Amino acid sequence: MVQSLPFGSAYLFAAVHQAGALGLAVDAAVVWLLTYAQSVFDVVNAGVMALVAFTEHSLRAPSPWIFALIVAGLGLWRVSGGFALFALLGLNLVLAMGLWDPMISTLALVLTASFLALLIGLPLGVLSARIKPVWRLLRPCLDLMQTMPAFVYLIPAVMLFSTGAVPAIIATLVFSMPPVVRLTQLGIRQVPLDLIEVGRAFGCSELQLLWKVQMPSALPTLMSGVNQTIMLALSMVVIASMIGGGGLGDVVLRGIQQLDVGLGFEGGIAVVILAVILDRLSQSLMLEGERALEARSRRWRSLWRTP
Amino acid sequence: MEDTMTAHLWRRRAVLLSGLGLATASLSSLVRLSRQRQARSTAAKSSTQKGSEPQSDSVLTQSSATGPLRLGWSPWADAEVMSLIAQRVIQQAYNLPVERVMADIGIQYASVARGDLDLMLMAWLPLTHKDYWTRVRDRVLDFGSMYSGRLGWVVPDYVDASELRSITDLQNPEVAARFQNRVQGIDPGSGLNQASEQALVDYKLGDMRLVASSSAAMTAVLDKEIRERRWVVVTSWTPHWMFARYKLRFLEDPQLVFGGVEWIHALGRQGLDREYPALTAFLSRFQIPDRELSDVLLMANERSAEEAVENYLNLHPARIRYWTTGKIS
């Protein structure tokens, strides 16, 4: 009775059109894809489905308290004691609110989508840093992916992959890939020339130059790209509940639609907790220069010695 | 010097110890909650009475003939309740697992037509969803209506009925000014919003503006204005929980722009009747009196949809028996 989006022409039925010529062309393109490339989409569909099913299954395997303990342990090792405590309390709150299952669903979607985004985005970033024309071609595409309103992806995603986890992941993938491509390209471009000179002077091949000189030097920039991708994926996964993505997005959407401020807020808080945990862990797990656990434990021990 | 040193040390120790204490408390609470959850899920599995799944459906959905029935729903109060009732009844009476897939209404029409979704319960016919219906009509099964609804413009009951009885009365500029010349609409492009645009034209309400937003924002505006007892017109529909929460009334619609009574139909994908003949019989008998539905909606709004549905199914065993067997006891 109400629809959340003006889905003017986003249908396979060319009956009532509100779109202009460009819109009609896009419509036609999607219909063409559906007619001639359905088998390709079916393969992608099955592959992504298997990946997300596996991810979700393995995330669900441990009991919640074991899961929380693992997260807190990782936090203690790589981030800080305060963060470990936050992770424990946050996950405790999520479990107490009864939102554990949707949180795991959302986490599975985010991890799958981010993994695919990195799988595609990192090589593209490297290529565009080293080959000018690729970058010239990619840049407008990235602009388009980042600035096209997120809702717009939902429609073709549904037409090509029906409803459920797969179109949610595909839409999320499109939305969250640009930062990793951009920041990889930037990081590699910013490697100081004298470093490259040194590499060349030692007789590096192009591949060695990439692996042993450019990559390590670009790593911090590259990792902030990875982190951004994960965070963007999380924000899109919530929107993707409009097409049956499920998880915390469902909780938030239900709260919004029914003016149930409490429910929407609970879902929102769960998203925030998940976001903070993902952010800190993804930042720390990949960077060099881990905060030394050794030094911290020594500090704690020194507290108990009488001066 | 010595004193400040030890004080500092003790403060550090206190912080560390309280942190550890908090962590231990949190961990024990986590363990306790996990145990409870474990117990609940095993209990749900063992008892056949409990056909309901955990609150959130997992993302592991596979649209195949062997998988569970996929039932589309939108996050409206009536859709949530009806889809829960259908899910429970189908699972208990026919032993078919049912998975609820939340999606936008437009997506649901497209998906049922393509066969990705097996069922949807929220087809507003003949007028509200006319656009969608004309496009999918020959590719879906219509199982008939379940309850009736009405669309239109709604005002709080404290708005003076002598001054404002029908939409025609809004032609009076003084009355329109009491509403700041605004009609609070819902999502742009929705059937109700398009009908409201038409109403502005047909009733020659040139001074009034329709403010598009979303259904949630519409209810929020209504709530705020009622708290301050101001005059407000919103575009709305029944069945909706807001009629249980506030005293409201529809403005009369002499030109029938909003088409009088609407019927809410259940639609299914083609071939469903051949694969599950019993299910077809149930869906065509699946009807719920408006009084009963508004009671369920009120309870769903005050407590939770699950509780309200549970309560309804326990209160009306004869009706459920009629739906599933066709026998009137």
Image (cartoon, coloured by chain):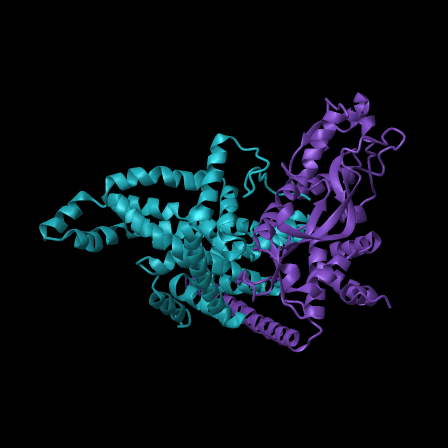
Chain colours: A cyan, B purple
- Nearer to the camera, B268 or B223: B268
Relative to A126, A280 lies left or right = right
Residue lying at 38% horizontally and 41% vertically, measured from the top left: A142
Residue B128, quarter of the rendered image: top right
Instruction: Give the residue furthest to the right.
Output: B162
Residue A132 pos. (x, y %): 24, 39
Relative to A52, A10 lies left or right = right
User: In which quadrant is the C terminus of chain A drawn?
Assistant: bottom left
Residue B70 pos. (x, y %): 61, 59
- Nearer to the camera, A115 or B89: B89
Residue B277 pos. (x, y %): 68, 64
- Nearer to the camera, A58 or A53: A53
- Nearer to the camera, B212 or B31: B212
Residue B295 pos. (x, y %): 81, 55
Residue lying at 41% horizontally and 38% vertically, measured from the top left: A144
Relative to B321, B23 lies left or right = left
